[in-house]
Amino acid sequence: MRIYVFAPHPDDEVFGAGGPILKWLEEDHEVFIIWLTDGRAGYRKSRELGTLIDNEETRITEEQLAEKRLAEAAASAKVLGIKPENCSFLKYHDRDLQNHVYDAVEKVARIIKNPDRFVISSTNNEHPDHQATHDIAVKVAEKLNLKDIEFYVYAYHTALKANAEHLVTVRFGNLRFKALEALKKHRSQFFTPDLEWQSKWVEGKRRDYYGRYKLADKGKFYNF
Ligand SMILES: [Zn+2]
């Protein structure tokens, strides 16, 4: 199977599918990751709130943070075992993806080849980049008439509400430790307050849940 994971930001590849990616690679699937934004806004909120740890590493511009985060994503992908040629960085500015949906659709449509599965963020998403990523992936599928691919929808910044028929569980057991190792490559994010509990969450979970849909299901479900 050819599986495309859509990550709105550097680190969403781990939060959305870290353990499952490791599992799918073990099962000999080909896995690709597309990062939509450059993560430059990663310090914006915590800086405003005064919760960002202040040190040499965080006293940088958003431009420098973007560069750092893209390199961290490449390092994370390496830990996960993704081939460099299967990594695509679209580099839209963090928090601005919704203004580039149509441009991104064109780009993604040129990147993907014979996909079997799209792993994407949920609709009804309170994070604008995560919503835009969802919209982009679905529009690509419509543009290329990918009626047969399956969408695995992950819920992050939103709730997963899938009935039994559409709920998939991916068990990856102790591959969670490798997923945590991949998360730790996103070093810049560990200066923000959320990463501590988020890394405990990644370290602790042995399975992930997805809503599984086809293009024809669009608009009929909470997450899709
Ligand atoms: Zn994100």
Image: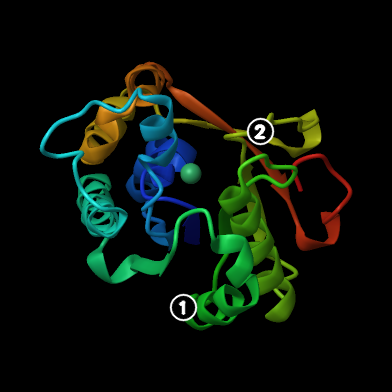
Splitting the image into 4 quarters, where does residue 71 fall?
A: bottom left
Q: Amino acid at mark 1?
A: Ile
Q: Amino acid at mark 2?
A: Thr
Q: Which mark is residue 62?
A: none
Above or below for 80 versus 204 = below
Splitting the image into 4 quarters, where does residue 178 fall?
A: top left
Mark 2–mark 1 Cα distance, whole angstroms, equals 28 Å
Label 2: element kind: loop
Q: Residue at x 36, y 67 (%)?
A: 89
Q: Position of residue 17 (x, y in %)?
A: 45, 41
Q: Position of residue 18 (x, y in %)?
A: 39, 39
User: Which sits earlier in the primary sequence, circle 2 or circle 1?
Assistant: 1
Q: Residue at x 44, y 62 (%)?
A: 93
Q: Residue at x 43, y 50 (%)?
A: 9
Q: Residue at x 81, y 39 (%)?
A: 222
Above or below for 177 versus 125 = above
The residue that mark 2 highlights is 158
Instruction: Give the label, 2 or 1, closer to the camera.
Output: 2
Q: Is residue 212 left or right of residue 23?
A: right
Label 1: element kind: helix
Q: Is residue 144 left or right of residue 169?
A: right
Splitting the image into 4 quarters, where does residue 140 fall?
A: bottom right
The residue that mark 1 highlights is 111
Above or below for 117 versus 168 = below
Is residue 208 visible in the rendered structure shown here?
yes
Ligand 1 within 8 A of label 2's CB? no
Q: Is residue 196 left or right of residue 5?
A: left
